[in-house]
Image: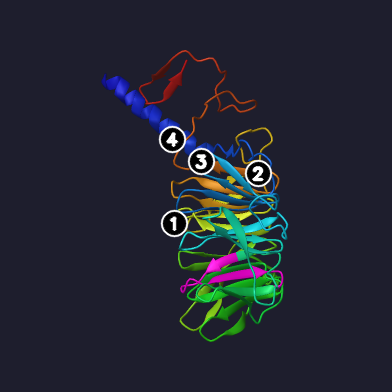
Amino acid sequence: MNFKLKLFSFFTFIFFQTVIAQNTVEFLQLSGENASTQSITYAIKQDKDGNVWIGSEEGILKHNSVNYKNYNTYNGLPETLSNRTTEIFIDSKNNIWAGLEKGVCLYNKELDKFDLIQNKNNINPSLITSIDEDSEGNIWIGAFNGLWEYNTKTQELNLKKFEEPIEALTIASNKIFFGTEKGLFIYNISKNNIQEIDLDSALKNIYHLSSVRNTVYVGTKQGVVFNLKIMLNEVSFNKVLRDFKNPIKDIIAKDSESIYVATDGDGIYHLDAQNKTLNHFIQNSNNPTSISSNGIYDLELSKDGILWVATYGGGINYFNPKKLPFYKIQHQLNNINSLSNNFTRSIAKDKNNNLLLV
């Protein structure tokens, strides 16, 4: 009995060492009636009720773990808009906001449809890239035609002083950070002014902004990720963290010490606190359980620990990091350290605690 216990403990140790060494994760694709058509997906978010909302080329998909529902210009989206939905945002009151090619919409729970938000001049934000919420509950929108604010008290949508194309937007320290192809800017809400952050010319093509654990991460179209130093009344460049060589689409917290980085062309990176790679998830045509596309547009870590992935051309992928798959120890061609063959009858341990497969 003692020998069996030791053998089990030893084999468990070998198993987990193998898991760490192989660093493999099994991805699944979201499939089912009405879900398979969502191949080009731009955004994914989960609300407080557990519903997953997906923005895609064909409209908006709602998935509640059992059923799917599509919202498009024939059903639930304003007929005056196109179906392309590039951004989904869930605010602090569990309201669902959708950024589309020709406007921003708010989900009407009572009528189960999306209503278009318009300003008094009937001018809409277009080609929306980012939506966020400030400490007062107001909604900020980054779009091709500039910076917009929706005041939730007055229910007014207004264009701010900045009218150039915005690629990314995030809110931190009650400041609106937004980036363009030409630089990184801050809109100070209390002072109602805009200032540009001084950056090297190689870092000015901003493609993504994230506020993660009180740190503002900035990703460029060339693939460089850097962060900012935020003082009480001053914001400045801090340091370059990594160069991924591919456009950065999203950065989220995995846990208290690590982050996921989504790239458009090289899959997903899982980085530790020192920005070293813990895992790299890429498409592998020989592995059906690998991620279905290297073009990653959005990431969402749900409250139950599932990582949801919006891809370009590969639909929605997901996996549970807390659930370890089974791993095979088997013969590998031209690998002298693998099993000599795949036919094994028993397992034993020698006097030096080496595991023997016979």
Q: Can you identify the residue that label 2 sits on?
A: 315
Q: Is residue 109 magenta?
A: no
Disc 1 or disc 4, which is closer to the eye? 1
Badge 3 element? loop
In the rendered structure, which amino acid carries the disc numbered 1?
Answer: Glu
Disc 4 or disc 3, which is closer to the eye? 3
Disc 3 or disc 1, which is closer to the eye? 3
Q: Which residue is drawn at 53% across and 76% down?
A: 154
* 203 w.r.t. 318: above or below: below
Identify the magenta region.
131-145
Disc 2 or disc 3, which is closer to the eye? 3
Q: In which quarter of the image is the N terminus?
A: top left
Distance of mark 2 from mark 4, alpha carbons?
31 Å
Residue 103 quadrant: bottom right
The disc at residue 65 is 3
Badge 1 element? loop
The disc at residue 257 is 1
Which badge, 3 or 1, comes first in the chain's sequence?
3
The disc at residue 16 is 4
Whether the residues at callouts 2 and 4 have beta carbons within 8 Å, the answer is no
Distance of mark 4 from mark 3, alpha carbons?
31 Å
